[in-house]
């Protein structure tokens, strides 16, 4: 273990996700375990630039493992994209005698961390936190599992009212670039169709499939739409299209929105956050830098930050096939 690292900083950046608090807790307690200091940075890179720091010890993170959001708060910082902003951040870290930085966030946050390291040779370590699960180098990002459970719960409730009224519902879920939430929650919620950014189903096939469902005796249907899907119409336009082009469907729209980002983290996300926090701190203490901690085949492993940023997650083709068969 490194003798030179005596104090670490931790921040959360970008869109929040359930499990971020559990990850901060794990970072803080691992620092305490190894008798090094830890400081929390408020509002992500904004707080780094403004010097908004608070010392955290093992007891400062009591009662947070079960809380959604992030008590350190999060932000998307424009100033950190400037050299002057990063210079200020570096000075603040030096003034506080911080020797390394743990960044909990998504690929934008990791890009900032990598630039920061290349300019100041400052040790950085990433923990993937986003509900979208769109980070290369980990099968699961923090918050993905919780968000799936939230979405499935919402679909189940929508199903109750859809079937009572024989209605077709378009349900929009988050995922501006990827369809992981839509595909997984869609299968679990028994959706008739799932529209994702990775695959353009096309309006004709959508209508065909809905018609087929009707002729095979389905009286209500749920179509899950990822917000970034490529069908070329937003969810309200989709409703209008079906209203105009299909007979006998009473169509409604439900946009789940930011409720998907909140709520108590699932058991899976709490355990994952704890494992990732321990690995992040111990890796920095082992002299590693510019890595992201990830989960691969059940093991916690490091992926170079550059790979994590540049790599693309792939949609699981087997899941696509399962969803096709299930909507028969
Ligand atoms: O956290 C990622 C994400 O949930 C995306 O799926 C979504 O498009 C975006 O955040 C919305 O974030 P905000 O409202 O913070 O801009």
Image (tube, rainbow, N blue to C red):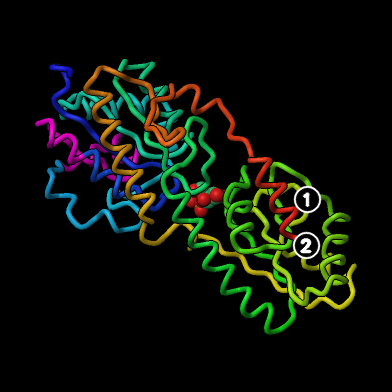
Q: Residue at x 9, y 31 (%)?
A: 35
Q: Residues within 10 Å of mark 1 (few under 14, many from 20)?
A: some
Compare residues 296 and 129 and report the one nearer the observer. Answer: 296
**Image: magenta residue range:** 28-54
Q: Is residue 143 left or right of residue 325?
A: left
Q: Is mark 2 within 8 Å of ligand 1?
A: no
Compare residues 210 and 94 and report the one nearer the observer. Answer: 210
Q: Residue at x 24, y 42 (%)?
A: 26
Dividing the picture into quarters, in which one does residue 163 lie?
bottom right
Pointer 2 residue: 238
Compare residues 30 and 320 and report the one nearer the observer. Answer: 320
Dividing the picture into quarters, in which one does residue 249 lie?
bottom right
Q: Position of residue 16 (x, y in %)?
A: 41, 50
Q: Mark 2 touching mark 1, by CB under 8 A? A: yes
Kindly tell me whether residue 243 is visible in this rendering.
no
Q: Residue at x 34, y 42 (%)?
A: 12
- Asked if residue 141 lies in the magenta stretch, the reply is no
Q: Position of residue 18 (x, y in %)?
A: 39, 53
Count of residue discs: 2
Q: Position of residue 20 (x, y in %)?
A: 34, 47
Q: Residue at x 27, y 43 (%)?
A: 24
In this rendering, the answer to whether 182 lies above or below 23 is below
Kindly tell me whether residue 57 is visible in this rendering.
yes
Label 1 sits on a secondary structure element that is loop
Q: Is residue 259 left or right of residue 95?
A: right
CA gap, disc 2 and disc 1: 9 Å
Q: Residues within 10 Å of mark 2 (few under 14, many from 20)?
A: some
Dividing the picture into quarters, in which one does residue 41 lie?
top left
The quadrant of the picture occupied by the N terminus is: top left
Give the numbered dot on residue 231: 1
Q: Is residue 111 left or right of residue 264?
A: right
């Amino acid at each position: 273990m490194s003798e030179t690292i005596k104090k670490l900083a931790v921040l959360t950046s970008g869109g929040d996700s359930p499990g971020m608090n559990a990850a901060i807790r794990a970072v803080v307690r691992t620092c305490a375990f190894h008798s090094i200091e830890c400081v929390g940075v408020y509002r992500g890179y904004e707080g780094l630039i403004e010097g908004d720091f608070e010392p955290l010890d093992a007891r400062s993170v009591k009662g947070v493992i079960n809380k959604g959001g992030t008590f350190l708060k999060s932000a998307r910082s424009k100033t950190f994209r400037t050299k002057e902003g990063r210079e200020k951040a570096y000075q603040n870290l030096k003034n506080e005698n911080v020797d390394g930085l743990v960044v909990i966030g998504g690929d934008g946050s990791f890009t900032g961390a990598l630039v920061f390291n290349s300019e100041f040779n400052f040790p950085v370590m990433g923990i993937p936190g986003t509900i979208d699960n769109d980070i290369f180098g980990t099968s699961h990002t923090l918050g993905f599992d919780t968000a799936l459970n939230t979405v499935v719960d919402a679909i189940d409730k929508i199903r109750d009212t859809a079937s009572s009224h024989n209605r077709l519902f378009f349900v929009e879920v988050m995922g501006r670039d990827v369809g992981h939430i839509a595909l997984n929650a869609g299968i679990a919620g028994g959706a008739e169709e799932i529209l994702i950014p990775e695959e353009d189903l096309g309006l004709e096939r959508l209508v065909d499939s809905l018609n087929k469902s009707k002729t095979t005796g389905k009286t209500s249907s749920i179509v899950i739409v990822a917000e970034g899907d490529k069908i070329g119409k937003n969810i309200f336009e989709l409703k209008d299209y079906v209203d105009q082009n299909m007979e006998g469907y009473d169509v409604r729209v439900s946009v789940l929105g930011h409720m998907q980002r909140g709520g108590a983290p699932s058991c899976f996300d709490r355990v994952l956050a704890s494992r990732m926090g321990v690995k992040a701190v111990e890796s920095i203490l082992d002299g590693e830098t510019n890595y992201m901690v990830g989960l691969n085949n059940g093991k916690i492993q490091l992926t170079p930050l550059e790979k994590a940023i540049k790599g693309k997650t792939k949609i699981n083709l087997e899941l696509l096939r399962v969803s096709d068969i299930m909507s028969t």
